[in-house]
Image (spheres, coloured by chain):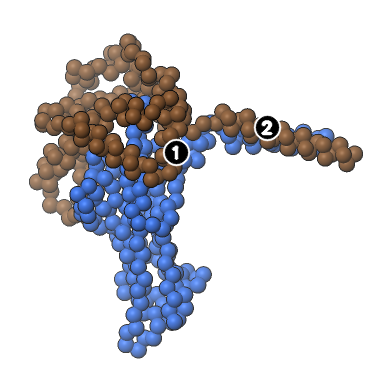
């Protein structure tokens, strides 16, 4: 009887350990999942999907929205299609505003910025591990990642330079805030600026039902 | 046999709950920093389905001070100065992250004898690349002790970045012990 009981416990424990090993094999961190998502849905894919909205002369396609939606879901964020279209539209509008104000960012500046960001990231072990997992999941080298993200970083930098070279002096002229309050208020000012841009942008929605 | 079946079932359930694929997203929710200066950390964002990183740094300094004034013997004043959290000069144009809260508690031995909030001030451009967002807290002259003993100050600040994923918040903790003879 005693032997039977011990045997039962051993079997149960074995099943438990086996399950941990098997299930943990399927459990992946968000970075790995994003890497795999890149492999399956972004790399080498041409976008011939339906245009669902137009902002100025730029099209927003179903595929670009789906990519955002699914990648957000991977990291546990839920965003509606409308929110994603607004995000993409705001990016387009802010880049246009930067261009209108002759903001340019040279490729070597972009490279320097990426190197700087990645260099500091390597000292943050948690994120660096995640980043390594992403590269592994996407089957790409760090250099390939830099190449892939250069246009994205360039767009983000244009937005950053626009905010600090154009919006900040404008805001400074219009206010006399103490240093203590300035930074938060400036962030609000930038947010309102983006919202106004979006309000006046006249986004054309081309979905069947609209 | 029933017991074995139950153990097995519980094991299966625990395995599934513990290793459900999305659980790792939550496990990344927060990170505690040790007492150090200029600790680099990173916010991660999603752009066009690809993770983009933006580095940041944080620091914490807690100073101890006591003085003997007038007839007071021993501990008269405790002052703390904490300088925490700086962010890159918004090079990527993201809205900056939000200050989530802080705790400054004072103890004598294991007894809590006081606490203070940390008013924020900006220490502008310590270096060309970084803006420091600093928080300063002290006892503002309040006497939190006037006799010998071991005093202890504990601080913790948390910053969140709603746009980021993975590590959504960063916390930095600090403490200092002061022995008043």
Q: Is residue B68 visible?
A: yes
- Residue A151 is tagged as none
* Gap in angstroms between the C-alphas marked 2 and 1: 26 Å
Residue position marked by numbered label 2 in the rendering: A18
In the depicted view, which residue is nearer to us: B140 or A14?
A: A14
Q: Supply the letter of whichever chain is blue.
A: B
Against A79, residue B120 (above or below) is below
Snapshot quadrant of residue B172: bottom left
Question: Are marks 2 and 1 in one subunit?
Answer: yes
Q: Position of residue A24 (x, y in %)?
A: 59, 32
Is residue A44 toward the left or the right of residue A192 in the image?
A: right
Query: Which secondary structure lies at badge 2?
Result: helix
Is residue B7 toward the left or the right of residue B75 in the image?
A: right
Against A97, residue A65 (above or below) is above
* Mark 1 chain: A
Against A2, residue B32 (above or below) is below
In the depicted view, which residue is nearer to us: A209 or A34?
A: A34
Q: Is residue B99 visible?
A: no
In the depicted view, which residue is nearer to us: A147 or A90?
A: A147
User: Which of the two labelled residues, at mark 2 and mark 1, occupies the earlier sequence position?
Assistant: 2
Using a 10 Å C-alpha cutoff, classify the residue at mark 1 as few (fewer than 14 neighbours), some (14 to 19) or many (20 or more).
some
- Residue A129 is tagged as 1
Which quarter of the image is occupied by the C terminus of chain A?
top left
Q: Position of residue B56 (x, y in %)?
A: 32, 46
Question: Residue sitting at 26 percent across and 32 percent down?
Answer: A153
Query: Which secondary structure lies at badge 1?
Result: helix
Snapshot quadrant of residue A65: top left
* Mark 2 chain: A
Q: Supply the letter of whichever chain is brown.
A: A
Q: Position of residue B99 (x, y in %)?
A: 33, 50
Question: Residue sitting at 50 percent across and 72 percent down?
Answer: B109
């Amino acid at each position: 009887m005693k032997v039977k009981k011990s045997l039962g416990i051993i079997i149960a424990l074995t099943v438990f350990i086996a399950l941990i090993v098997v299930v943990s094999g399927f459990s992946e961190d968000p970075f790995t999942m994003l890497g795999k998502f890149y492999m399956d849905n972004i790399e080498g894919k041409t976008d011939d999907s339906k245009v669902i909205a137009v902002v100025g002369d730029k099209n927003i396609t179903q595929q670009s929205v789906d990519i955002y939606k699914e990648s957000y879901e991977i990291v546990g964020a839920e965003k509606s299609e409308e929110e994603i279209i607004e995000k993409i539209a705001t990016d387009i509008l802010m880049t246009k505003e930067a261009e209108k104000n002759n903001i340019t960012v040279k490729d070597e500046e972009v490279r320097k910025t990426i190197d700087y960001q990645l260099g500091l990231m390597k000292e943050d072990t948690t994120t660096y591990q995640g980043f390594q997992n992403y590269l592994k999941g996407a089957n790409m080298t760090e250099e390939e990642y830099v190449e892939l993200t250069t246009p994205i970083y360039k767009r983000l930098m244009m937005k950053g330079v626009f905010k600090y070279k154009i919006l900040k002096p404008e805001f400074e002229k219009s206010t006399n805030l103490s240093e203590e309050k300035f930074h938060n208020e400036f962030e609000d000012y930038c947010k309102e600026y983006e919202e106004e841009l979006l309000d006046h942008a006249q986004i054309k929605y081309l979905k069947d039902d609209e | 046999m029933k017991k074995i079946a139950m153990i097995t079932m519980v094991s299966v359930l625990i395995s599934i709950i513990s290793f459900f694929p999305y659980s790792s997203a939550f496990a990344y929710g927060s990170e505690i920093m040790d007492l150090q200066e200029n600790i680099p950390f990173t916010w991660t964002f999603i752009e066009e389905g690809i993770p983009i990183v933006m580095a940041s740094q944080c620091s914490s300094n807690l100073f101890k001070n006591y003085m003997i004034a007038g007839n007071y013997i021993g501990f008269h004043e405790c002052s703390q100065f904490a300088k925490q959290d700086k962010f890159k000069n918004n090079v990527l144009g993201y809205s900056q992250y939000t200050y989530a809260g802080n705790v400054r508690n004072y103890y004598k031995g294991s007894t809590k004898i006081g606490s203070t909030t940390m008013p924020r001030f900006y220490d502008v451009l310590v270096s060309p690349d970084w803006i420091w967002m600093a928080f300063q807290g002290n006892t503002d002259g309040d006497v939190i002790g006037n006799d010998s003993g071991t005093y202890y100050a504990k601080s913790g600040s948390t910053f969140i970045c709603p746009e980021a994923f993975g590590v959504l918040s960063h916390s930095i903790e600090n403490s200092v012990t002061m022995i008043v003879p």
